[in-house]
Image (cartoon, rainbow, N blue to C red):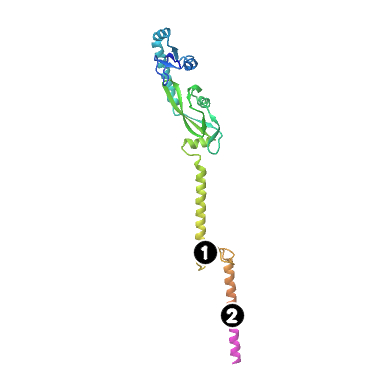
Amino acid sequence: MAQMDIILLERVEKLGNIGDVVSVKPGFARNFLLPKGKALRANEANRARFEADRERIEKENAEKRAVAETDGEKLSGTQVIMIRQSSDSGQLYGSVSARDIATALSEEGHNVDKNQVTLGEPIKTLGIHQVDISLHPEVTVQVEANVARSKEEAEMQAEGIDIFAGDDEEDTMSASERAAAEALARAEAQAEAEARGEIFEEGAGPAEGDEGADGETDASDTAEAESDATADDAAKAEDGEEDKTGA
């Protein structure tokens, strides 16, 4: 395929720096580089024009780079919160685009155009995503897009907390609580059995006829036994009196 020779008027990543003559696909040149003022066709007239204006072009580029560096110091590390709905697995119902990020940064007071946002593809999952912002061909800074379902979750993510770990942790805690409750119940049952002089067998339930662990049935049985003993003593005493009288 035929190539087109152009003269770069600014640094273009992976192509070259100001004043470099490079070959590119005609469509890339006609649709992007030439209309954006990033290059000139490399013919004799434009070569002479560039050389005449080289000093001015390089000076203007340096001024723009200095402004971009100042803006970049303020912008670098900025985190914008993007509230989106998602599935339980974190997959967004929709996506976050370069335009969305540029708008969010602008609302934070930063002058950023969507064309300056370098996003290979739209963001489609929850989490904190690193995004490059090209403020100048020679100045690129990184910001963070904190994509969450709520401001509370965004704050958790900003603190490094995994918002999906909560469910598993809750299940673990519930299991621990159940284990502790079971251990306590076994200890109480063993203590009650030892108090009654019984042998405690782990996993055994109350003996047949017992009403429960409160001891109500045991107390009733004890009272009945004491009543029978008293009656027997009285009968023996009465028999003794009769024997004496007969004698």
- Residue position for label 1: 192
The part of the image, by quadrant, that contains residue 64 is: top left
Residue in view at x 48 percent, y 33 percent: 128
Q: Residue 190 vs residue 240: left or right?
A: left
Secondary structure of the residue carrying numbered label 2:
helix
Q: Which residues are magenta?
A: 232-247
Check if residue 160 falls in the magenta segment: no
User: Where does the image place residue 77, in percent across and percent down from the top left?
Assistant: 44, 29
User: Where does the image place residue 228, in percent across and percent down from the top left?
Assistant: 59, 76
Residue in view at x 52 percent, y 53 percent: 178
Residue type highlighted by circle 1? Glu
Q: Residues within 10 Å of mark 1 (few under 14, many from 20)?
A: some
Residue type highlighted by circle 2? Asp
Q: Foreground: 216 or 163?
A: 163
- Residue 113 visible: no
Relative to 168, is 209 above or below?
Answer: below
Marks counted in the figure total: 2
